[in-house]
Image (cartoon, rainbow, N blue to C red):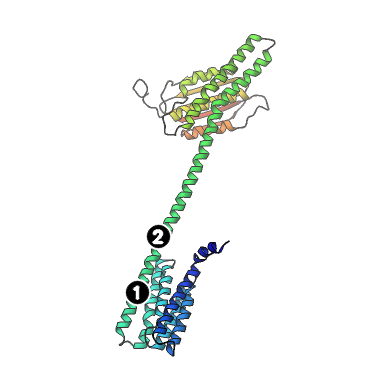
Amino acid sequence: MSLSDRRPRLLESRLVRDALIAASWLIAFAALRVSGGGFGGLASIDFAVAAAAALALVWRRSSPIAVLAVTWLLYAGSTVMAGDVSNSYFLFSVAAYTAVSSAAQVRTAIAIGMVAVGGSTLPLLVVYGLNGGTAEVVLILVLTGMIAAVGLAVGMNRKVIATQRARAVEAEETREALAHTRVAQERLRIARELHDAVGHHIAVMNVQAGVAEALLESDRDRASAALASVQEAGAKVLEELPLMLKVLRQDEDDDRPGVGLDQLEDLIAQAQAAGLAVTSAVAGLPARLPDGVDQAAYRIVQEALTNATRHGDGTAVLDVAVDPVSVAIRVSNPIGAPGTSGSGFGLVGMRERATAADGSLDTGREGDLFVVRATLPARRVASDEGGAR
């Protein structure tokens, strides 16, 4: 590190700056003494006291109360010895300002200021008595009071600035935390959309590919139909994936096209094409539902049928009932052979969708069946015919 790099850093130290200020004051005071007749007698004592007070000021920021006490003792002693206001008063006033401005609480700062004001006049009362030196006493009283008031104002301003900075830092940390939360939520939403939109069709393709392989030699017509189902499911993936990605790029408040219960027949047909025999009972449709509820209901049915295809015995019963209050969904299927359990992410996704739509979802075994029950608030809006259903 070069000398040019060290100098700015050295000057940044408060201790060094205070030492330079004290040294400058002593040089000026010595010059005044030389021009006024030198350092004989009390002048030399006064200069020694001033030097000690200036040295104490070097630590005024780290130990303000101790420095205030030391400078007051030096000021009071030299004033009583000289019979007049000592030049050390100016150093005492600097210590008083520092002690008041650096106090932790306003009440403490006021108390220190009052002690400093009283202490500044006490040596003069000893010198002049209660009936003499009124002008000097009043002058020192007013001057010290003004210095204490300035210190109090500066200290309060520092506290206000520190509070504002702390709040700004806290607000920034809160914004960062919210941003991280939004990112995590968006990742979860993307994962859920991918699982629901693509997983269903992949399950269809997987089942039908297995059927085609098994029938390729024995029943070419059925194998061909199975391969056609695989092709159709692949086309659905290619069709739905760009739409889903478009939805994910939009803001949550945007009006966006999505899936809903009006596509329930197509969903059942896809499940049946995948080899799942679906018995369905649907009541209350068509009905216009809020987008979030409509999409959540569709995705819950889709995931439940996908699970039945993957882990059941090839049959499922679907019941959907829509009334002015709620959307009730029940999907049941016989439990398949051991070893067909899944990761559980689909069940988690269904529950999250139901919760996001202010609804509820329960899953579990009922005898030999695995049952998915969901209840979502309907909150119907005006129908296409112009009336409320």
Decide which of 193, 148 is in the foreground and name it.
148
Taking depth in this image into account, of 302 and 20 the one nearest to the observer is 20
Query: Which disc is residue 295 wearing?
Result: none
Residue bearing mark 2: 160
Give the residue displayed 41% in from the left and 24% down from the top: 288
Residue 383 drawn at (x, y percent) = 37, 23
The tag earlier along the polypeptide, 1 or 2, is 1
Residue 370 percent across, percent down from the top left: 59, 27
User: Looking at the image, is 230 positioned above or below residue 24?
Assistant: above
The answer to whether residue 11 is above or below residue 322 is below
C-alpha distance separating marks 1 and 2:
23 Å
Q: Amino acid at mark 2?
A: Val
Residue 151, given in percent of the width and then of the height, sits at: 39, 69
Q: Is residue 16 visible?
A: yes
Label 1 is placed on what type of residue? Gly
Please state if 48 lies on the left or on the right of 195 as rendered.
left
Residue drawn at (34%, 79%), measured in percent from left and top? 140
- The reply to whether callout 1 and callout 2 are in contact (CB within 8 Å) is no
Relative depth, front residue between 302 and 33: 33
The residue carrying pointer 1 sits among few (fewer than 14), some (14 to 19) or many (20 or more) residues within 10 Å by Cα, namely many
Q: Is residue 167 above or below residue 324?
A: below
Residue 123 appears in which quarter of the rendering?
A: bottom left
Q: Is residue 110 above or below residue 389?
A: below
Q: Residue furthest right?
A: 217
Tell me if 181 is positioned left or right of 387 in this view.
right
> Label 1, on which residue?
145
Badge 1 element: helix
User: Dot 2: what SS?
Assistant: helix
